[in-house]
């Protein structure tokens, strides 16, 4: 076992290819994971199309992939405690830069490195991970479902329970019901939000939102859109509007239907400026805008416990399994919404 396949992105030429590379060797405090499943995320698409630029890249070529599950294969030097070889695990999607030891529990951190973007991730047969980033998963949790927890599920989970702090009976709108937005709907339902209004231009996405627990699914282009939101919320407007699309027009529309003290939560990412055209009523109704990025360190372990306890079934989130060698095709399918996927899973 000297070489392996890995999905490599060359930052200088912006070329992506599945290549044969040496199997990495774990150093002190690290483990080698045999990858069993890796999710394909819109952030991966943004990395490859150039709209997401690594802020703290550790080399000029990176193995893509930050949603990973697998089995501990080899322990690094000196690792005698902790999880043993053979343990089924999922990986937290980031780590600290190392300049401020122990700051992984402090939020926010301006130098939190992201797997598959700033350093090598899991679109590979094997991946290196810090021992403290591993979350054991039960035998009852399939690898494909475990793999998507560290971003597709943990990002909206942290947005709902921490950044927004949604409480039971509060109204929620979710714009963009793709890989992240679909789970935002489910998690808002889990904490008791009511009503939950999903917003997406795709009829298939609106149907999925209803299946995932939305009370109402609207087309953002509907001429009576704002009236429908007001009617669904008893004239109060939304307590929280989650932008899971990262689109300026979405943010403007979402802000416009917030009620008194309502908050716009920016979950989707975009390099384009935030623009809100609303004037005095934004101040008068004391509306807010809150930025959000990724999940928090505790999010993954909490979600693993929730799925193990039967509170969250992620099986409907897995759209298809694709061989690692066909990673470029998976990116194409997600980028062009072929089959309207929630999550595509690469299998080495």
Image (spheres, rainbow, N blue to C red):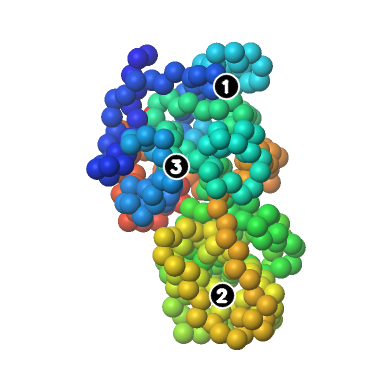
Above or below — where is 170 with respect to 86? below
Q: Which residue is mark 1?
A: 29
- The reply to whether dot 1 and dot 2 touch (C-beta < 8 Å) is no
Q: Residue at x 67, y 84 (%)?
A: 284
Q: Earlier in the sequence, mark 1 or mark 3?
A: 1
**Taking 10 as reference, is 116 left or right?**
right
How many angstroms separate mark 2 from mark 3 (CA)? 32 Å
User: Would you say residue 59 is visible in this rendering?
Assistant: yes
Above or below — where is 55 with respect to 163? above
Q: Nearer the viewer, mark 2 or mark 3?
A: 3
- The reply to whether dot 1 and dot 3 touch (C-beta < 8 Å) is no
How many angstroms separate mark 1 from mark 3 (CA)? 21 Å
Q: Nearer the viewer, residue 15 or 154?
A: 15
**Horizontal and vertical percent for residue 57?**
41, 39
Badge number at residue 56: 3
Q: Which residue is mark 2?
A: 255
Q: Residue at x 49, y 35 (%)?
A: 68
- Hey, which residue is sitting farthest right in the picture? 168
Q: How many marks on residues?
A: 3
């Amino acid at each position: 076992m000297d070489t392996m396949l890995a999905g490599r992105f060359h930052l200088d030429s912006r070329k992506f290819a599945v290549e044969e590379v040496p199997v990495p060797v774990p150093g002190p405090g690290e483990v080698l994971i045999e990858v069993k499943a890796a999710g394909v995320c819109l952030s991966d698409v943004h990395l490859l199309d150039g709209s997401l630029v690594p802020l703290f890249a550790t080399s000029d070529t990176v193995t893509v992939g930050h949603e990973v599950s697998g089995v501990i294969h080899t322990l690094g030097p000196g690792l005698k405690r902790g999880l043993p070889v053979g343990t089924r695990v999922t990986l937290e999607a980031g780590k600290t830069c190392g300049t401020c030891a122990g700051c992984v529990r402090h939020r926010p951190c301006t130098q939190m490195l992201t797997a598959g973007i700033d350093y090598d991730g899991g679109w590979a047969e094997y991946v290196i991970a810090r021992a403290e980033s591993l979350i054991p998963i039960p035998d009852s949790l399939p690898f494909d479902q475990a793999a998507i927890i560290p971003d597709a599920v943990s990002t909206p989970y942290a947005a709902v329970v921490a950044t927004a702090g949604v409480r039971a009976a509060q109204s929620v709108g979710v714009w963009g019901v793709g890989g992240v937005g679909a789970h935002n709907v489910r998690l808002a339902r889990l904490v008791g939000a009511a009503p939950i209004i999903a917003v997406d231009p795709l009829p298939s996405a609106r149907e999925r939102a209803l299946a995932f627990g939305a009370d109402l699914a609207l087309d953002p282009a509907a001429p009576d859109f704002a009236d429908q939101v007001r009617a669904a919320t008893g004239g109060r407007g939304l307590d929280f509007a989650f932008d899971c699309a990262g689109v300026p027009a979405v943010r403007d529309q979402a802000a416009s239907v917030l009620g008194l003290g309502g908050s716009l939560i920016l979950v989707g990412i975009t390099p384009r400026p935030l623009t809100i055209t609303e004037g005095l009523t934004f101040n008068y109704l004391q509306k807010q805008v809150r930025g959000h990025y990724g999940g928090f360190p505790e999010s993954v372990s909490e979600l693993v416990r929730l799925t193990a306890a039967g509170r969250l079934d992620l099986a409907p989130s897995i759209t298809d399994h694709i061989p690692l060698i066909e990673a470029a095709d998976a990116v194409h399918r997600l980028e062009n919404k072929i089959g309207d996927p929630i999550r595509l899973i690469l299998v080495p």
